[in-house]
Image: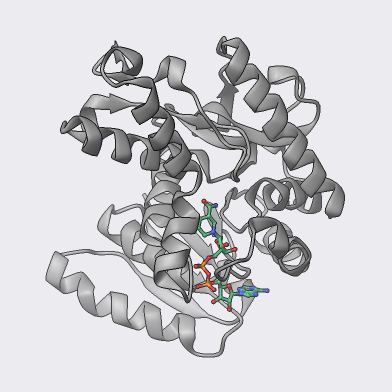
Amino acid sequence: MSRKKLAMIGAGNIGGTLALFAGIRGLGDVVLFDIVEGMPQGKALDISHAAPIFGLDFSISGTNDMADIAGADVCIVTSGFPRKPGMSRDDLVAKNAEIIRNVAAGIKEHAPDAFVIVITNPLDAMVHLMQQETEFSPNMVVGMAGVLDSARYRSFLAQELGVSVNSVSAFVLGGHGDSMVPVRSYTTLGGIPVDLTLDEETVEAIESRTRNAGGEVVALLKTGSAFVSPAAAAIKMAESYLQDRKELMAAAAFCQEEYGVKDMYIGVPVIIGAGGVETIVEIDLNEDEKKQLDKSVAAVKGLIELL
Ligand code: TXD
């Protein structure tokens, strides 16, 4: 059985890290595509030199020709530009929308059966646009944000509690922006509700830090945004698809009426398997969480209207 093929559309900070992680996790062969001459080729060559050291058998190539993504099983899209200090994710809309339209046309032509994971910001608007432009079935187009935001929430909680990250279960729903919704009522330390383990003020502070975690990294890096954790999050999603793992995770999925959301992408709990986004899981939210989610949906709607 031939290896799967993953196409990384955009070979920048996240794209290059995606390629490396895909190789380390043995997900399949990798093609790195970018418009910058030579850069994807150079990154692919460098990663191929690491393969013998880690004993990784996969082919990896870089290209400036979109046709080389032909037949990809998974396309992970980071093409676009990251925020600079002081920029909001919304400031990226016009700039990145044009890029996503071009990329969508290429994926539609060369990888019509691919599961498409969009990372480019502003995420919820870009994944919505990707599905519209490719006209792929919505279950085959998903946005990566919730896995990252949930991981940030879990990381801060685990640090505060002094426990293994494996013992903290949490997820963040809604848009990938300041209005994201850490769902405290489902956040537990090994099944123990977080409200029984930490005081209200501490949890509030952690949730606020989670909302701003991307901005915190941008402010420290000054010349770019987070790239290791976003890449890890997208690889987790690709793995669940390629290996039909049917893992539950938070992701930007197309809601037709779920959570009262009509025909748009928003971060919700989903099951990802060989059918792509196989199920959107509806959970009961408390009044405050419902209010926060409605606010987040409105913020995403505003972004989509800018497209
Ligand atoms: O959780 C999330 N979804 C966010 C997403 C987490 C972190 C970063 N987020 C966004 O991902 C960020 O705001 C950007 O919009 C994307 C990619 O971030 P990255 O840090 O990888 O940006 P880079 O290093 O600038 O890489 C972008 C690459 C760059 O090499 C460009 O040359 C390329 O995109 N690019 C293109 N590639 C292909 N096709 C076209 N048209 C194109 N235009 C630019």
Query: Could you tell me how many numbered marks the image carries?
Result: 0
How did the renderer colour the structure? Answer: one colour
Q: Residue 134 location, x and y as percent?
A: 76, 52
The answer to whether 41 appears left or right of 197 in the picture is right
x 73%, y 41%: residue: 300
Q: Residue 272 location, x and y as percent?
A: 49, 32
The answer to whether 39 appears left or right of 2 in the picture is right
- Position of the C terminus, as image quadrant, is bottom right
Q: Residue 276 location, x and y as percent?
A: 56, 35
x 37%, y 56%: residue: 28
One can see residue 285 in this view: yes
Q: Quadrant of residue 50?
A: bottom left
Rendered view: 72 above or below 47 = above
The answer to whether 121 appears left or right of 251 in the picture is right
Q: Nearer the viewer, residue 145 or 270?
A: 145
Q: Nearer the viewer, residue 57 or 103?
A: 103
One can see residue 72 in this view: no
x 61%, y 33%: residue: 174
Q: Quadrant of ligand 1?
A: bottom right
